Image (tube, rainbow, N blue to C red):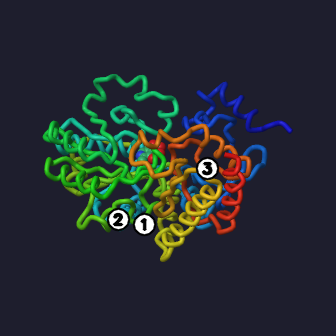
Amino acid sequence: MTDRNQTLFDRAKTVIPGGVNSPVRAFKAVGGTPRFITRAQGAYFWDANGQRYIDYIGSWGPMILGHGHPAVLDAVQAAAREGFSFGAPTEREIELAETIIGLLPSLEMVRLVSSGTEAGMSAIRLARGATGRPKIIKFEGCYHGHADALLVKAGSGLATFGHPTSAGVPPEVVQHTLVLEYNNIEQLEAAFAEHGSQIAALMIEPIAGNMNFVRASVLFMRRCRELCTQHGALLVFDEVMTGFRVALGGAQSVYARLIPGFAPDMTVMGKVIGGGMPLAAFGGKRAVMEQLAPLGPVYQAGTLSGNPVATACGLATLRLIREPGFFEALSARTRALVEGLKAEADRAGVPFSVDSEGGMFGFFLLPTLPQNYAQVMASDAARFNRFFHGMLERGVYFAPALYEAGFVSAAHSDADIDATLAAAREVFATL
Ligand code: PLP
């Protein structure tokens, strides 16, 4: 049988760099032929050969309801009939802003944009504009999109290619970006001691999903909050991945349960709020957000920002995840998956550690959970790749790189989890 995926990949490579429109899709980390997806429904998608996969990437996070939820589809179709894009404001943008603010008490205002990259880039500009300071702190292994100032030893796709920074970013552009080790309190304190009065923002993935799945420790997060407050820097939570995914109130609600009174100053969002459509946002307190154009001096704009079809998709998605019991069920299903994987690995004598929060998870071929990027990257990549391909052959699609998190949706059934674990048992036995 001809491999349609390979035929399409060969054809793609002649007209699209690397054959893909986002690097991790190329399977460069794991080798082999990327699957070209023809359609998706519920917890599954199908490739160009007609092979079905249980989908544990969910478009890298947005598809929390699974694919093609009928209520979301109806909302999108109705919105599309009313018009694709107007370049003028709509009521749905207000509704979405009100919904987001209602779910995240740390926000008083939000601005809608079209991608997480755009949201992160704009949040940094706003933080610098609002504080009048140049420097930002980011952490190695955290990915905040591909804005120039944030492409400093970034994780995710870049790590595959072994470049600590991207070509095309002049050193001057990143000279104000301090890159620190995740969960390293000493480095954090030293950075504030040396640069405190110059730091506009500390940007962090509170539960990092771009070095697989690594939580900021409670002590570390508390210190981030204290030092930002003490030095007048803004604590910016990048919740593009964790927002409305690890809990209805995002990772900030998880830390607020552990640290009394805890809240970030600004939040960057994407993925779930668009339900699979290009939509992202950033928000914070009114005094900061009112520094944005047209009110304030910080410029930010977008032809497709607050797109009417995307906002309809996002609103329908957020409506469904607010239903009572949604996150309890999603968390339980995700835990069943990771605990089951751990049991199968133990049975086969394969070193394995797992973690999850809400509908987001990570697993490592390591005996204990890593705390930072270097520890994640100490994983046995060859072994991971054998695991990945073994699962893929058995119709289970995990993230094609060991430094990516995974996602469970409300459409994943107990039978899907059982089928995944049965496949894992076979694959672990071969490792
Ligand atoms: N921030 C985080 C935490 C992300 O995971 C991502 C993408 O994966 C981004 C920002 C960038 O978002 P986008 O790919 O929509 O530009």
Farthest bottom residue?
324
- Name the disc covering residue 398, or none: 3
From what the image shows, is residue 235 above or below residue 338? above
Residue placed at 53% from the left, 65% from the top?
335
Residue 286, picture quadrant: bottom left
| Residues tagged 1 and 2 counted as in contact (Cβ below 8 A) | yes
- The residue labelled by disc 2 is 253
Give the x, y percent position of residue 46.
Answer: 72, 50
- The residue labelled by disc 1 is 248
Residue 223 visible in the snapshot: yes
Real-space CA distance between mark 3 and mark 2, rounded to the nearest whole angstrom: 27 Å
Tell whether circle 3 marks a residue whose Cβ is less than 8 angstroms from ligand 1: no
Give the x, y percent position of residue 395.
Answer: 72, 52
Left or right: 111, with 397 as reference point: left
Observer-nearest of 295 and 211: 211
Q: Residues within 10 Å of mark 2 (few under 14, many from 20)?
A: many
From what the image shows, is residue 113 above or below residue 180? below
Q: Ligand 1 sits in which quadrant? A: top left
> Which is nearer the N-term, disc 1 or disc 2?
1
Q: Residues within 10 Å of mark 3 (few under 14, many from 20)?
A: many
From what the image shows, is residue 112 above or below residue 385? below
Tell whether circle 1 marks a residue whose Cβ is less than 8 angstroms from ligand 1: no
Q: What type is the residue that disc 2 sits on?
A: Ser
Observer-nearest of 49 and 31: 31
> Which is nearer the N-term, disc 3 or disc 1?
1
- Name the disc covering residue 345, or none: none
Q: Residues within 10 Å of mark 1 (few under 14, many from 20)?
A: many
Real-space CA distance between mark 1 and mark 2, rounded to the nearest whole angstrom: 8 Å
